[in-house]
Amino acid sequence: MKRLSCLILLAALAVSCGPSRHTIHVEMRHPSKSGIEFTGKNVAVVHLENDNPYSNGLTEGMADGLAYSLEQEYGTGEGSVGIYRMRVIPGGVYSSRDTLVNLLIDTGSDVVFVVDTLATGAITMGGATSVASATVRDSSFISTGNLPFTMKLYCFDAMNKDEKVYSFSGSSVAVPFAYSDGAQSAAVIRERAIASLPELGFEAGVTLSSSFKAQWKHEQYSVVYFETPQWLRALDYAEMYEWKLAMDIWLQLLDTNDMLKRSCAAYNLAVATYMLGDYDLASEWLDRSDADNELPLSDALRKRIDARK
């Protein structure tokens, strides 16, 4: 009976010596619906100008709205996305790669957008209607109208290995407005309506930016650990997404002749550097882990790393 107890104890110790797996749930940022990744890149927005005041008002606002929304989405700060106005050149092909490369050089950016001049229909303005709570006499009436337009947007990412020019187009109807005292002429109302177009364009630019905002997806990742204080402390940091603190411990745990433990520490470092966005370094850590002892989890992580590079 004593011998059987000893055998059971030895079996339990053998099991406890192996690593355990812990699943961490995270929300991971993925490229936008457009397929373009903007994180860490310098972005510029160029809007083209011609002799059409309706087109110019809307494209100016669109450029402002698009730049503002990208700054908000990627946390680059107000004014970090450059906005440029450029006179359209007759016969210019603004959807061509060569043209956009030149604009990249001129603006010093990694990614450039071009808001092309709009094809606009005839503007129509309705009659003046009274405003319920006007504060000044000149704004006691409002006239609204309709302005159909078709827009084209081009984008080129110099850091994208495909070197593809992305094109986007669509049609909509702007609703210009003009405040008055109800006695202004149709010409004055039209001029005031034109002045409202940049504001409407801004709203359209913000809406347009939805195609370029990052997508967030729920994903699960695994780290491995042993039942010792150092491994468990690193696991606690990983669970709190304190990846750099966890890495400090896993780097220390590399200092061992135990190839399995060394492989596990390197694997965890690959997970951490992947979470921090350094995919090349993550790949190097996974290579080092596989060289010591390829873990069952390695192949799945490598596919995720390669998909990001």
Image (tube, grey):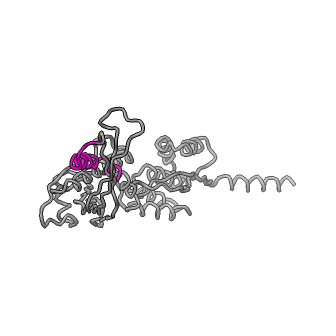
Closer to us: 90 or 253: 90
Which residue is the extreme one toward the left? 90
Q: Position of residue 111 (x, y in %)?
A: 27, 55
Among the 4 quarters of the image, the one containing residue 121 = bottom left
Say whether residue 259 is left or right of residue 75: right
Q: Nearer the viewer, residue 214 or 89?
A: 89
Q: What residue is at 51 percent from the left and 48 percent from the top?
A: 256
Q: Residue furthest right?
A: 1
- Spot occupied by residue 120 in the image (x, y as percentages of width and height): 25, 61
Question: Where residue 22 sits: x, y (%)?
Answer: 60, 52
- Does the segment drawn in magenta span residue 186? yes
Magenta stretch: dominant secondary structure:
helix
Asked whether the viewer can see residue 149, the reply is yes
Q: Judge from the rendering whether residue 245 lies leftward or rightward of residue 174; answer left or right.
A: right
* Residue 42 visible in the snapshot: no
Side of 4 relative to 15 (left or right): right
Segment colored magenta: 183-204
Q: Is residue 61 left or right of residue 305?
A: left
Residue 247 in percent (x, y) is at: 48, 45
- The residue at 28%/47% (across/down) is 196
Between 220 and 228, the residue placed more toward the observer is 220
